[in-house]
Amino acid sequence: MRIAAAPGSRAEDRAEDRAPPPAPNYGIDSDRLLDRDSLPAALRRRWDGRYAVDEFGGDPHLQDFLLAPVVGRLPVRTVGAEHLPASGGALLVANLGVGLLEPLLVAGAVQRAVDRRLRLVGLPTLPGLGALTHKLGGIGRRAGDVAAVLRAGHLAAVPLGRTLSPRAAGEAPRLVIGATLGFPVLPVAVRPSGPVGLPAGGWVVAVGPLCRPPEGTATDDPLAAAELAEEVRRAVAAMLRGGGGDP
Amino acid sequence: MRVLVTGMGGHLGTRVAQLLEIRDDVEAVAGFDLVPPRRRLGRSVFKRIDPRDRDRLVEFVRDFAPTAVAHFGVYEPAARMGIRAARVASEECTVTALGAAARAGALECVAVRSGIEVYGRGGRRPEVPDEHAPLGPTTPYGRTCLDVEAHAAGLARRHDVPVASLRFAPISGSRAPSPIGRLLRLPAVPVPALADPPFQLLHTDDAARAMVAALDRRAQGPFNVVGPGAASPWQAVRLGGRVPVPVAGPGWLVANRIAELAGSPVPPHVLELVRRGRVADGGRAVDELGLVGLVPTQEVLADLFAWASVTPLPGAGRPAVVATPGSS
């Protein structure tokens, strides 16, 4: 398969073509955030087993109930939200500092901008906690698993290599980008908005424009994948250097 | 098309024969199995042959000279027979029937039953494998499926016949005996205490439909056929109104024994499904076999639980037929 010349069209078409017909999962959409049930209604639903489970182990009902209110309250300002796709699979590549907060901040930004859930790649796997992180949207860190999530039409966020400085962009996830060649890739920079790297006024999540491999690239071209990975890393680094304000 | 349906006595084989015999472009349908079909068949010819009885089987297949083979003679352990018997029967049926069909000289296409058990679970394996994922079965049934695929691939090479391997998700639904169906229909069901892995099921009719589509299109290569969406043990058990019993570690040995005594033997591939999940990416089959409108996993479950174990006859004041959960 080759990547078409038209901007993003082929990749997005493919993602939407491949999106499975919506399963009647008790009215629960596994991609789009829904209104929360009231507490008794939610408990009743859990008790009756009438909630959706998706093939990646995700539990959209639990995500809406536990995760969405938390990440929705994080102090995040989103820049470039218009780049986020309203439907179809896409890969967000975000920087990762010392903590665990960056992926949650990206999830918060996505939730506010397009009302979609975000699949997080590479959450720490602790014994006994794996089931919970999977339910809340975590997925395995193998490249094939991320590709399967995108084929199913979900948004996935994969981190750059971990760095000590909140203003540095780590190594790009080449294997993941190689396995998902053909899907839209968006660079995302997460940085504290206050002076000297302090999150005084919350965080800024900057979403850059789509990065794409050159026209006519085969979807299994490792060199194109490496180049795209580098391009994404540079884009994230540039947005991080952009300073406290807008990029 | 002259179609040989191996394993015609099973629910799936009978269903495929029913789908084939109503079509005008199918000249003849013949099949064999250890057990006779339990549903009405029209013009299909059934012969009761034990796959281990090679001479009779070869003679039957040679005389029929099929142009297409729907190979359902791949027996899931604990559906109708034990683990070892299922492996032997599957192997004999595959080698003898496919070999004889190829030597009869008219063969044009083959579709074999396999399962997403061939991918195995755990270790470095992908969580949602597609058809390119490495094969590393971790259960006896997975290894049987892998052997069947290998035999069929060898046949494809030697005789230049397109062979489709249909890797089905665990097939379940009402009226078809399946070990996962029996387990989920117990009044109390063991579930993993510290995990809740996703699994997918496939409706019996969809499995039959996929087989017919694969023969129709002369499909080649592996196809994952799964019911869209997924379920998890805790959710499935509560959906059925059963009692989930959290089990961990060596507790599974005990749970396994109790389930067996309660009428639901739990073979290793079902135990693995409950403890580690069983999912695959079914995109290729939907695109290339045109399998739109597959029954979602949640509906397969609902169908399974809606299947009454006590069937009141009309007019009778009390239940007339009492069946144990999961028996057919």
Image: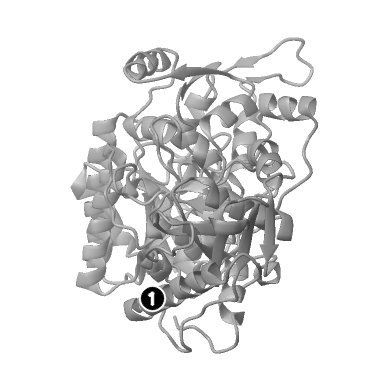
Quarter occupied by the C terminus of chain A: bottom right
- On the image, the x and y values in percent for residue B181 come to 51, 31
| Tag 1: amino acid | Ala
Q: Nearer the viewer, residue B195 or A90?
A: A90
Identify which residue is drawn at 59% across, 61% down: A153
Whether residue A115 sits left or right of residue A135 in the image: it is right
Instruction: Establish if B64 lies above or below A47.
Output: below
Question: Pointer 1: residues within 10 angstroms few (<14), some, or many (20+)?
Answer: many
Q: Nearer the viewer, residue B32 or A222?
A: A222
Instruction: Establish if B191 lies above or below A174.
Output: above
Q: For the image shown, how many numbered marks are present on the structure? A: 1
- Residue farthest toward the front in the current orientation of the protein: A196
Identify which residue is drawn at 65% across, 45% down: A71
Residue B221 visible here = no
- On the image, the x and y values in percent for residue B101 come to 28, 62
- On the image, the x and y values in percent for residue A216 come to 45, 89
Whether residue B227 sits left or right of residue B85 in the image: it is right
Identify which residue is drawn at 52% across, 51% down: A120
Instruction: Establish if A220 lies above or below B199.
Output: below
Instruction: Establish if B286 lies above or below A141.
Output: below
Tag 1 subunit: A
- On the image, the x and y values in percent for residue A197 come to 54, 56
Identify which residue is drawn at 53% across, 65% down: A91
Secondary structure beneath dot 1 equals: helix
Quarter occupied by the N terminus of chain A: bottom left
Q: Nearer the viewer, residue A83 or B84?
A: A83
Whether residue A100 sits left or right of residue B48 in the image: it is right
Q: Circle 1 sits on which residue?
A: A225
